[in-house]
Amino acid sequence: MVVCKTMVFKIKLIIMKTACVLGGGGFIGNHMVTKLKELGYWVRAVDVKLPEYSISMADEFAIKDLRSGFVVSDVLVSPNQKKTNNKENSFDLVFQFAADMGGMGYLAGGGHDADVMYNSAIINLNVAKIASKFGVKKLFFSSSACVYPMELQETSDNLGLKEKDAIPAHPDLCYGWEKLHSEWVYDAFMRNYGLSIRIGRFHNIFGTHGTYENFKAKAPAALCFKVANAKDGDAIEVWGDGLQTRSFLYIDECIEGILRLMDSNYTQPVNIGSDEMVSINTLAQMIIDISGKDVTIKNIQSDKIGVTGRNSDNTLINEVLGWKPSLPLSYGLIETYNFINKKVNG
């Protein structure tokens, strides 16, 4: 008598480290995608457009509109969940950068307020609800220094905005109101549904591979573009008297700060910004000096200059992460100017 033994082989599914970058076609989102790939993650990027100045390194790039709840439900299912149909295998990390935004040329003046409020708010409501439902392990929300009260930013010698200063609320622009509202949305979903959140309040992030040649460009990139196009003897225009002050954070330190925050257990908003404050005229002159050109500054009247003074107080981030941004502004400006100058002049 012959006994047949059946051998059963169990195929072990390979569970990858996974991340989803919402707004992955934008400046910060695309840099985050690249960094996550360096760290060994499988990455899905989602945006209504591809990156403008480089090829996305994402494993999967979905060109979709996150204002649709059906779209958010689709893109927040991780490949591990699709394989196992198990909530425990949800995305390890989700980064929510998607927003209707731009520089002061876009945000100031009120002409885009309705779009900024509606588009960004509905995206964040969708993401908070569906990320909670799907069991996303950690979610980062990109807030802004625009949440801080305008009356704390009326002088050019701003000593630094502390996270606790946001309440009582009087944010800068409709953009700031939407960001503060969405902070509270994510906090509510954390308290009521257990969503694990991290919130970073960005202070003027700049760097390579970002918008520089239209009204959505931020000040460092816009000024680099003006200088790159200028010839010896020209004057570049700077909005306002140029005495308004800001601090600017280079993209590499922004990405590092976000990832350090994600590795922490801290769930309240944290400033992610430099505390090296300069006037806009000083910023422009630094870029001119980097270029080596004989170019002067021409200040022009404008209603698109924003608050008088804004700076990041980095006490809290140093306390909770044991780290704070430290690269000098000049380092990031050199990198950014060289990138834009090459695009402009070859």
Image (spheres, rainbow, N blue to C red):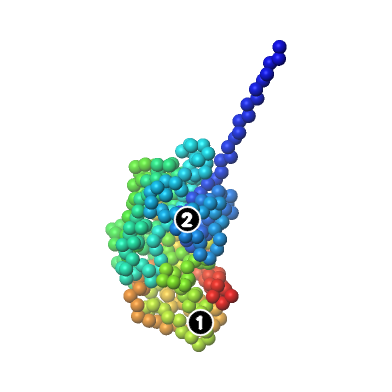
Q: Is residue 96 visible?
A: yes
Give me the residue at 61% from left, 33% from top: 11
In front: 44, or 220?
44
210 above or below 88?
below
The numbered mark at residue 281 is: none
Furthest toward the right, the residue is 1
Give me the residue at 39% from left, 45% from top: 130
Looking at the rendering, in which quadrant would you find the C terminus? bottom right
Kind of residue at disc 2: Ile
Q: Which residue is mark 2?
A: 63
Q: Quadrant of residue 189?
A: top left
Secondary structure of the residue carrying tag 2 is strand
In front: 257, or 220?
220
Secondary structure of the residue carrying tag 1 is loop
Q: Which tag is nearer the camera, tag 1 or tag 2?
A: 2
Q: Quadrant of residue 173?
A: bottom left
The image shows residue 332 at horizontal and vertical percentages of 53, 68
Q: Which residue is mark 1?
A: 230
231 above or below 30?
below
Kind of residue at disc 1: Ala
The image shows residue 206 at horizontal and vertical percentages of 48, 66
Is 42 placed left or right of 47 in the picture? right
Give me the residue at 50% from left, 40% from top: 82
